[in-house]
Image (tube, rainbow, N blue to C red):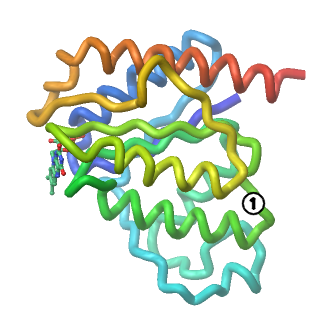
Amino acid sequence: MKVTAFNGSARMNGNTTILLNTVLEELREEGIETELVHLSELEIKGCTACYQCWNNKDQQCAVDNDDVNELVDKMVHSEGIILGSPTYFADITSEMKALVDRAGMVSKANEDMLKRKVGAAVVVARRAGSIHAFDSLNHFFFIGEMIVPGASYWNVGFGREIGEVAKDEEALGTMKTLGQNMAWLMKKIYSK
Ligand SMILES: Cc1cc2nc3c(=O)[nH]c(=O)nc-3n(C[C@H](O)[C@H](O)[C@H](O)COP(=O)(O)O)c2cc1C
C-alpha cells in the first residue's frame, strides 16, 4: 500500500512540507509506503480544455508536454493521495490548482479512475483563508468518488516564516491523527 503526497508550495522545505511529513511519518509507522512530491520542482501548466482525454480514455492528459502525466501516473499507482497547499489569497496555489484541474478531468474521462482511493487535504496559512483552500482540495476527492478520513480538527496549520508551523502543536496533533485514520481506513479497504 502506498500514499503519495503532493506539495503545492513554492517552498520545498516550508510549512506545508512539515505538515505533510508529519502525516507521512504516521503512515510509515503503520507500514504504509510513502512518497512526497514537490510541485515546485516540476513543470505544471493549466488545463487547455481540449477535452481530448474524453476521446483517448488512456488515463493520461492528452497534452503531454510537461510533468503532469507523471503525477497522474503516481496517483493511479497509489492507494492514498494527499494534496497539500499553502493558502495563497484564501485558496490553493496555482500549481496545485493546475494539477487538480488536469488530474481531475483525466479521472472523470476515465470512469473516475481514482475512485475508492483514500484522499486527504492539508493546508497551511499565515492567518486566514485556510478553510476555503481546504474545501478547494476536498472538491477534488469528492467529485472523484474518493474516500476522505477525518481528523481531530480540519487539517490546517498556522505559520508564515519557514518552519513556523512546527510551533503549532494542535496542527501537528491533527496531522498525526489524520495519518493514523488514513492508515486505518486504507487497511480496511485494501487489506485482503
Ligand atoms: C502569494 C501569497 C499569498 C498568500 N496568501 C495568504 C492568505 O490568503 N492567507 C494567509 O493566511 N496566508 C497567506 N500567505 C502566507 C502563506 O500561506 C504562509 O506563509 C504559509 O506558511 C506558506 O507555506 P509554505 O511555507 O509551505 O510555502 C500567502 C503567501 C503568498 C506567497
Respond yes or no on whether mark 1 lies under 8 Å from ligand 1: no
| Extreme residue toward the right, this view | 192
- Judge whether 42 appears above or below 78 on screen: below
- Judge whether 85 appears above or below 92 on screen: above
| Extreme residue toward the bottom, this view | 50
Picture residue at 77% right of the left edge, 75% below the top: 57
- Viewer-side residue, 37 vs 101: 101
Picture residue at 37% right of the left edge, 53% below the top: 39
Q: Quadrant of residue 184?
A: top right
Picture residue at 16% right of the left edge, 31% below the top: 159
- Judge from the rendering whether residue 81 lies leftward or rightward of residue 90; answer left or right: right
| Extreme residue toward the left, this view | 161
> Which residue carries the number 1 mark?
112
Q: Quadrant of residue 23?
A: top left
Amino acid at dot 1:
Asp
Quadrant (top left, top right, bottom left, bottom right) of the N terminus: top right
- Viewer-side residue, 64 vs 85: 85
Q: How many marks?
A: 1
Tell me residue 48's x, y (percent): 48, 85
Tell me residue 115's x, y (percent): 75, 50
- Viewer-side residue, 66 vs 170: 170
Quadrant (top left, top right, bottom left, bottom right) of the C terminus: top right
- Judge whether 76 appears above or below 66 on screen: above
Tell me residue 81's x, y (percent): 58, 41
Picture residue at 49% right of the left edge, 61% below the top: 100
- Judge from the rendering whether residue 184 lies leftward or rightward of residue 72; answer left or right: right
Tell me residue 6's x, y (percent): 45, 45
| SS for dot 1 | loop
Other residues around mark 1 within 10 Å, as few (<14) / some (14–19) / many (≥20): some
Q: Quadrant of residue 7?
A: top left
